[in-house]
Image (tube, rainbow, N blue to C red):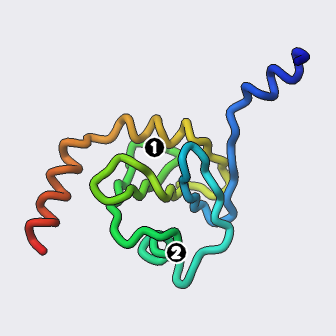
Amino acid sequence: MGLLDFFKSNKIETNESTTGVYSVSGKNLTPLNELPKTGSIRDISESLGFKTWHSVVTFESKKIQCIVFKRRTKEPIIVLATDETQSLSYSDVIKIIQQIDWGFQWRQLDFEDSNK
């Protein structure tokens, strides 16, 4: 492996979505350049096979507007970028997930579930 190959293999992969919406699978972000039906979070999550989910608005991020998670987990399934012209990487998502107040989020979910 040459020096150039070393730098290529260690480059953080970023993706750009024309809609600003990404699906998350494992550690991969996939740009969703065409949105299903109305393009709502519900429509997108259902098209990805998730009937239940919870979302967190990320006010502290300049790159990410909202992250949608599998219900009652910290596993992201959809990411909405603040600006669709800016590319995102999985490390951008992880940084924001680590900043979320999960105690507050779990209490919110408990409240929602107890009022169904």
Residue 16 locus on image (x, y percent): 69, 53
Amino acid type at mark 2:
Ser
**Which residue: 14% across, 51% down?**
107
**Which residue: 65% across, 59% down?**
31
Residue 97 locus on image (x, y percent): 40, 41
Q: Earlier in the sequence, mark 1 or mark 2?
A: 2
Which quadrant does the N terminus fall into? Answer: top right
Residue 25 locus on image (x, y percent): 55, 52
Tell me the mark number nearer the camera, choosing from 1 and 2. 2
**Which residue: 47% across, 38% down?**
94
**Which residue: 50% across, 49% down?**
64
Q: Residues within 10 Å of mark 2 (few under 14, many from 20)?
A: few
Pointer 1 residue: 61
Pointer 2 residue: 47
Which quadrant does the C terminus fall into? Answer: bottom left
Q: Mark 1 falls on what kind of element?
A: loop
Q: Is residue 104 above or below residue 46?
A: above
Amino acid type at mark 1:
Ser
Snapshot quadrant of residue 103: top left
Task: Tell me: 43 left or right of 35.
Answer: left
Pick out the residue farthest to the bottom. Answer: 37
Pick out the residue farthest to the top. Answer: 3
